[in-house]
Image (tube, rainbow, N blue to C red):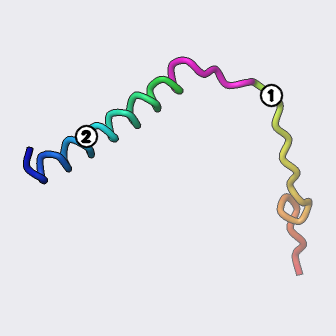
Amino acid sequence: MPTLFRFLFICGTIAGLVYITMWSFAVFVEPRERDVTVRIPSERINPVEQ
């Protein structure tokens, strides 16, 4: 097998494995729901005018 074809075959195989891994995470892994609290400084909400 020439070198270019071998290289393209290996790159395609790696890309396929990455794609299958991402697909399986998207399908089989369920995210956990949780509350998110973000503190915003009062200076950003009520800016002080000078």
Label 2: few (<14), some (14–19) or many (≥20) C-alpha neighbours in 10 Å: few
- In the rendered image, residue 40, in percent from the top left (x then y), is placed at 86, 55
Does residue 36 sit above or below 49 in this rendering? above
The residues colored magenta run 26-32
The alpha-carbon separation of the residues under discs 2 and 1 comes to 38 Å
Look at label 1 and name its amino acid.
Answer: Arg
In this image, 6 relative to 12: left or right? left
- In the rendered image, residue 42, in percent from the top left (x then y), is placed at 91, 60
Does residue 18 sit above or below 32 in this rendering? below
Look at label 2 and name its amino acid.
Answer: Gly
Q: Residue at x 20, y 41 (%)?
A: 9
- In the rendered image, residue 22, in percent from the top left (x then y), is placed at 46, 32
Does residue 36 sit above or below 7 in this rendering? above
In this image, 2 relative to 40: left or right? left
Residue furthest out toward the front? 1
Q: Which mark is residue 14?
A: none
Q: Is residue 19 magenta?
A: no
Quadrant in which the N terminus appears: top left
Q: Nearer the viewer, mark 2 or mark 1?
A: 2
- Say which label, 2 or 1, has the lower sequence index: 2
Quadrant in which the C terminus appears: bottom right
What residue did someone put label 2 on?
12
What residue did someone put label 1 on?
34
Residue in front for this viewpoint, 24 or 5? 5
Label 1: few (<14), some (14–19) or many (≥20) C-alpha neighbours in 10 Å: few
Q: Is residue 29 magenta?
A: yes
Residue furthest out toward the bottom? 50
In this image, 5 relative to 43: left or right? left
Q: Secondary structure at mark 2?
A: helix
